[in-house]
């Protein structure tokens, strides 16, 4: 076994054990079924669905990466194609369709998430060259943008 993958397997195992213990503790400490407890339990999912709705869009800076990365593997395993309408995002699932709008000129494009990034802490995404061209950001390199999830990926 390669030592390179040992820490990743250890953290996955640690996460699985932690989740199992948390579920066990929660099952043991669950209160008896009563009307106020049931009302509280129903209110919690509604609050989390509101948080999800606000997580479907975000504002921030986006940049693009060009031809020098052509052919390299992305985090999803696909080869990077600068002519495809794709983007890198830190957390959205691969395959998610995102509408990216350049705040300055109002131009937008729908892209598919197929990579992880950006590594710069002040940015929310990196676009392919084709997507950057569609929203008119080739000369500026980095622009303020609004990201809206159109459809969820895997």
Image (cartoon, rainbow, N blue to C red):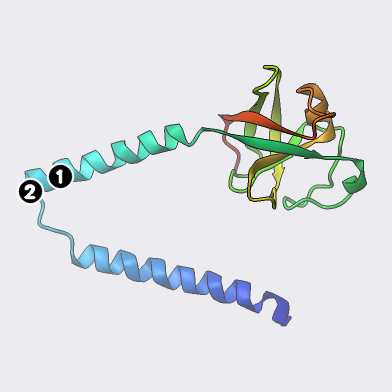
| Secondary structure type for disc 2 | loop
Q: Residues within 10 Å of mark 1 (few under 14, many from 20)?
A: few
Q: Which one is in front, 125 or 74?
A: 125
- The residue wearing badge 1 is 38
Asked if residue 94 can be seen in this view, the reply is no
Q: Do the residues labelled 1 and 2 touch (CB within 8 Å)?
A: yes
Residue sticking out furthest to the top: 106
C-alpha span from label 1 to label 2: 6 Å
Question: In the drawing, does residue 86 fall left or right of residue 31?
Answer: right
Question: In the drawing, does residue 77 fall left or right of residue 26?
Answer: right
Question: Image height check: is 150 above or below 66?
Answer: above
Question: Image height check: is 10 above or below 120?
Answer: below
Location of residue 39 in the rendering, given as x and y in whole percent from the top left corner = 15, 40
Q: Quadrant of the N terminus?
A: bottom right
| Secondary structure type for disc 1 | helix
Asked if residue 7 can be seen in this view, the reply is yes
Q: Which residue is drawn at 36% across and 34% down?
A: 50
Location of residue 32 in the rendering, given as x and y in whole percent from the top left corner = 10, 56
Q: Residues within 10 Å of mark 2 (few under 14, many from 20)?
A: few
- The residue wearing badge 2 is 34
Location of residue 78 in the rendering, given as x and y in whole percent from the top left corner = 79, 47
Question: Image height check: is 116 above or below 142?
Answer: below
Question: In the drawing, does residue 12 fall left or right of residue 69?
Answer: left
Total tally of numbered discs in the picture: 2
Q: In which quarter of the image is the C terminus?
A: top right
Location of residue 20 in the rendering, given as x and y in whole percent from the top left corner = 38, 68
Q: Residue at x 40, y 70 (%)?
A: 18
Q: Residue at x 83, y 26 (%)?
A: 133
Q: Quadrant of residue 109?
A: top right
Question: Image height check: is 115 above or below 132?
Answer: below
């Amino acid at each position: 076994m390669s030592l390179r993958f040992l820490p990743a397997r250890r953290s996955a195992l640690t996460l699985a054990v932690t989740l199992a213990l948390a579920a066990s503790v929660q099952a043991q400490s669950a209160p008896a079924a009563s009307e106020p407890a049931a009302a509280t339990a129903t209110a919690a999912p509604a609050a989390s669905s509101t948080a999800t709705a606000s997580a479907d869009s975000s504002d921030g800076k986006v940049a693009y990466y060009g031809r020098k990365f052509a052919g390299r593997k992305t985090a999803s395993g696909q080869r990077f194609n600068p002519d495809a309408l794709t983007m890198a995002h830190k957390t959205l699932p691969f395959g998610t369709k995102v509408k990216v709008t350049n705040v300055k000129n109002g131009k937008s494009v729908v892209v598919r998430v197929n990579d992880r990034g950006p590594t710069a802490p002040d940015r929310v995404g990196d676009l392919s060259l084709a997507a950057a061209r569609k929203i008119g950001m080739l000369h500026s390199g980095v622009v303020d943008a609004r990201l809206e999830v159109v459809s969820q990926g895997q």
